[in-house]
Amino acid sequence: MTLAGVIEQHRDAMIDFARRLIAIPTENPPGNCYPEAAALIRTHLEELGFEAQVSGACILTFIGDGPRTLYFSGHYDVVPAQDRSQFEPVMKGANLFGRGSSDMKAALASMIYAAKSLRDTSTPLNGRLGLVFVPDEETAGPLGSRHLASAGLLGQDAIGMLTPEPTGGIIWNANRGAITLKITVKGKSAHVGRQAEGINAFEGMLSVAARLQVLKHEVESRTTAFRLSPDPLRRSVLMLGGCCQSGSNFNVVPEVCSFTVDRRINPEENLEEEKRRLISVLDQARAAGIDLQIETIQDGESAGSPEDGPVAVALARNIENVTGRPAQFEMCPGLLETRFYAARGIPAFAYGPGLLTVSHGPNEFVPIDRIVQCASIYAQTAAELLS
């Protein structure tokens, strides 16, 4: 029987595992129920005959032998739910609903059963296939991929990495980097009738924001050479005020005002240089007499892998073989775990069964046929690259 035929036989098993994993509320932040999810993944792998390796909250397993390793890596944390019922997975027609169904718990089932099908069909592998399951993707990976990197376990002997993010049928071969800051401007409280005795933190914030808007205009004139649709999305990003908070009452001079700055850098830009430019603007505001503090919420590198390398070509070929549609490459508008591998010179790509348009939303779902298709694409890609 073909790989695709064996994978189709595992359809019900994939759905069952996805439902069991969705039912565990691994919300991040704050990082709930990681031990329960990791235990389920480990137990399931061992029931299928895989030997699981545990490192912190991460699970790894390998099939095959040799110095060349292709990695399938996915995360089991999810963004917080809008409603607790989202952790009660529901089948509706051809779709599986629930928090994490699209991003990306159902895709973890695709990874597992792709590997199982390769093993069960005795597909010859000149090297290893590694499965990696991590938490903390939604908050930059301190307990996940960052942990594996610091432990020396990330991307050992890698020829490539695939992650089943909800790409909606395209391949993400690049991602933006991120610098997210919280700026807190301090003032002095006073009654509105005696405002001359106070220092208005909100007005201080406006002055800081005006300086940042000058930088924003320059930053957002840049575009990436990577594909992203529609075309205006190719511009670099500096967003002000995603979160903003000030004051205690309408008749009190605000003592504190805070706001966020979210800088998303394209692969052609340098993270440290862009961070220095941001901090320089804030230092100038300080020098002008504004009392402010800076908190770094996240920073992450941008990354990109070429479309014409062996991993990209094999993935694109097998997407077309399975779906009947030519593969398309684009840049992800946000951060991706591919950056940890690309930073080590490892070609890294995202392609998964989910849909970005519904991920993180109140009606998150994944088409069941896509779960099976993704497993087949991953298995056939691994068979080709490790032949």
Image (cartoon, rainbow, N blue to C red):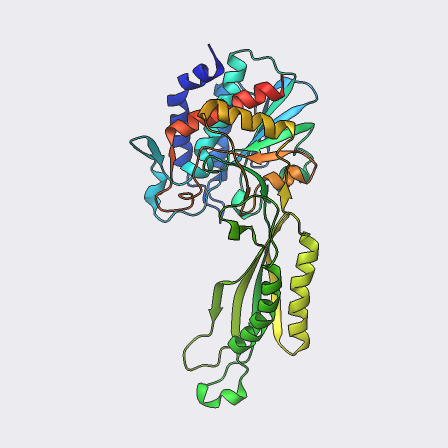
The location of residue 364, given as percent across then percent down, is 38, 41
- 148 and 343: which one is in front? 343
Q: Is any part of residue 143 visible from this angle?
A: no
- Relative to residue 24, is residue 174 drawn left or right? right
The one nearer the camera, 250 or 96, is 96
Determine the residue positioned at 68% across, 18% down.
66
Q: Along the horizontal axis of the image, is 184 left or right of 19? A: right
User: What residue do we see at 57% from left, 18% from top?
Assistant: 383
**The one of 95 and 255 positioned closer to us in this rendering:** 95
Residue 299 seen in the current view: yes
Q: Is residue 343 left or right of residue 314?
A: right
Q: Position of residue 140 (x, y in %)?
A: 57, 47
Question: Looking at the picture, does residue 236 appear above or below residue 102?
Answer: below
Query: Which percent across, then down, holds residue 238?
Result: 57, 59
Q: Residue at x 50, y 17 (%)?
A: 117
Q: Quadrant of the C terminus?
A: top right
Residue 384 is situated, as x and y percent measured from the top left of the image, at: 59, 19
In this figure, what is the number of numbered marks?
0
Give whichever of 60, 356 is nearer the camera.
356
